[in-house]
Amino acid sequence: MIILFNVIFRILHMLMVLMPSRNAFKIWLRQMAEDALLMEHVAADIRLAGELFRLKSRYSGGGIASAELIAERILHSAAYRLGRAIFHGLPSRWPVWMIHELERRGAFIEEAFWCEGRSYGYQDACDYDC
């Protein structure tokens, strides 16, 4: 997923640079590029949190507890950013399967933190914009 979002971002960014500065299509391209970059970062954070949780389950010790806290924070932050983006119309601009895949991977790692972060992100965006 990370490579896919990186390729999409690079293509959109290249097209955006080639377009004239005052063009409505360029604004749309910029928004799509920002969305692709956000989804790339969310996918990378999900992957990192998954690796930290796997290390925690494999090893036990004093340093692992802090790794679990870091993984929980990373996962919560990724879900928060995705929740805000969903409120701002991410599903209307991108195929639903991409967003569902990010949701599935995040919830698979630790569903409680994922759902909490996503709902907080959505609610904060709603409170701020409404």
Image (cartoon, rainbow, N blue to C red):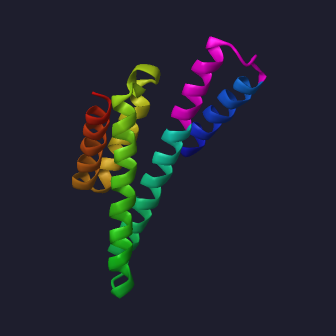
Front-most of residues 26 and 5 = 26
Front-most of residues 9 and 87 = 87
Please give left or right for residue 20 compared with residue 28 in the image: right
Q: Residue at x 35, y 61 (%)?
A: 73
Q: Residue at x 58, y 38 (%)?
A: 4
Residue 83 location, x and y as percent?
33, 39
Residue 87 visible, this angle: yes
53 shown above or below 111: below
Please give left or right for residue 103 compared with residue 21 in the image: left
Residue 25 location, x and y as percent?
63, 14
**Total count of labels:** 0
Q: Which residue is farthest top?
A: 24
Residue 105 visible, this angle: no
16 shown above or below 72: above
Q: Residue at x 46, y 60 (%)?
A: 48
Decide whether residue 30 is among the magenta residues: yes
Q: Residue at x 40, y 72 (%)?
A: 55
Decide whether residue 105 is among the magenta residues: no
Q: Which residue is farthest bottom?
A: 62
112 shown above or below 83: below
Residue 12 location, x and y as percent?
65, 27
Front-most of residues 78 and 55 = 78
Residue 22 location, x and y as percent?
70, 15
Please give left or right for residue 40 compared with residue 118 in the image: right
Quarter of the figure with the C terminus? top left
Please identify the quarter of the rendering in which residue 2 is found. Answer: top right
Q: Which residues are magenta?
A: 18-36
What secondary structure do most residues of the magenta stretch adopt? helix
